[in-house]
């Protein structure tokens, strides 16, 4: 029986340290991680291959999180869950503004990151059946 293909998480954030830490932690958990430094790179990454989950920063140069989400939803009829990564105090509102399924506040606990990713990937699996 072939091994299951690892689930892909797209991380879109302009902070290279966040990209590095999140990638390391999620790869250690067995996920395939694709990173993008802004929303434009994120949209290009989606064109290259639809992820199973998107972790999205909101305040970025070039194409911000709001613009990314608007373009993503306009281009793709996809149920890929988006989780907002933000340092804003109103993280829940930011997530609601773009139709995200959830949010993770910065700075975040690495265990919280892993459990949130796992939870939303499980939900996505249930929806796909």
Image (cartoon, rainbow, N blue to C red):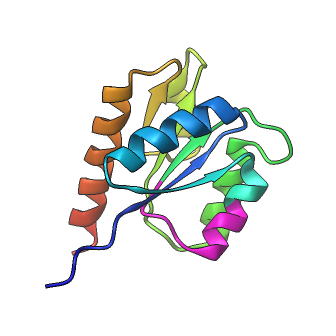
The quadrant of the image that shows the N terminus is bottom left
Q: Magenta stretch: residue 48 in it?
A: yes
Pick the front one: 119 or 19: 19
Residue 80 locus on image (x, y percent): 45, 62
Residue drawn at 66 percent across, 40 percent down: 13
Residue 128 locus on image (x, y percent): 28, 72
Residue 108 locus on image (x, y percent): 45, 21
Q: Is residue 85 depicted above or below 98 in this figure?
A: above
Residue drawn at 56 percent across, 14 percent down: 89
Q: Is residue 89 depicted above or below 25 in this figure?
A: above
Q: Is residue 52 left or right of residue 94?
A: left
Q: Residue furthest right?
A: 62
Q: Is residue 65 left or right of residue 30?
A: right
Q: Quadrant of residue 25?
A: top left
Pick the front one: 93 or 39: 39
Q: Magenta stretch: residue 13 in it?
A: no
Q: Residue furthest left?
A: 1
Q: Is residue 99 depicted above or below 25 in this figure?
A: below
Q: Is residue 52 left or right of residue 45?
A: left
Residue drawn at 76 percent across, 36 percent down: 60
User: What is the tally of numbered marks visible in this picture?
Assistant: 0
Question: In the rendered structure, which segment of residues is drawn in magenta?
Answer: 43-53
Q: Quadrant of residue 125?
A: bottom left
Residue 100 locus on image (x, y percent): 48, 45
The quadrant of the image that shows the C terminus is bottom left
Q: Residue furthest top?
A: 89
């Amino acid at each position: 029986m072939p091994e299951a293909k690892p689930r892909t998480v797209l991380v879109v954030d302009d902070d290279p340290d966040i990209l590095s830490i999140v990638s390391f932690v999620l790869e250690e958990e067995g996920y395939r991680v694709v990173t993008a430094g802004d929303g434009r790179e994120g949209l290009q990454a989606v064109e290259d291959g639809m992820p199973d989950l998107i972790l999205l920063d909101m305040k970025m140069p070039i194409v911000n999180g709001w613009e990314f989400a608007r373009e993503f939803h306009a281009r793709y009829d996809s149920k890929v869950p988006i989780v907002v990564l933000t340092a804003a105090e109103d993280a829940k509102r930011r997530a609601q503004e773009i139709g995200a399924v959830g949010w993770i506040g910065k700075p975040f606990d690495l265990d919280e990151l892993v459990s949130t990713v796992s939870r939303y990937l499980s939900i996505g699996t249930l929806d796909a059946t």
